[in-house]
Amino acid sequence: MENSLFENAKQAVSRFTQNRRQNGGHTANAQDMQAAKQAIQSAYSQCSQEEKQQLQQLEQKLDSDHQNMR
């Protein structure tokens, strides 16, 4: 069975990244970023060790994108 929380987290990060690119890299929706972070946190409770590593990478990507927005 596929972990839907894990998939939701990946999709939320993807939405945030796409919205940021569509806005020319200057602004991103803070709500999208918060939703992505919450989805990642929710997914941690029901994922494998491998998925946890991927979630950590997604968090790092969000943090990096957030730093680049400033």
Image (cartoon, rainbow, N blue to C red):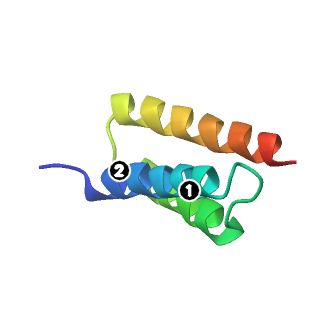
Q: Horizontal and vertical percent for residue 34?
A: 64, 64
Closest to the observer, 58 or 18 = 18
Residue at image coords 34%, 44%? 47
Closest to the observer, 34 or 16 = 16
Q: Horizontal and vertical percent for residue 1?
A: 11, 49
Q: Horizontal and vertical percent for residue 68?
A: 79, 40
Name the disc covering residue 57, or none: none
Q: Residues within 10 Å of mark 2 (few under 14, many from 20)?
A: many
Secondary structure beneath label 2: helix
Mark 2 and mark 1: span between their CA atoms? 16 Å
Give the amino acid type for the residue marked by disc 2 in the picture: Phe
Q: Which residue is mark 2?
A: 6
Secondary structure beneath label 1: helix
Q: Residues within 10 Å of mark 1 (few under 14, many from 20)?
A: many
Closest to the observer, 63 or 47 = 63
Name the disc covering residue 16, or none: 1
Question: Is 29 on the left-hand or right-hand side of 49?
Answer: right
Question: Is 68 on the left-hand or right-hand side of 40?
Answer: right
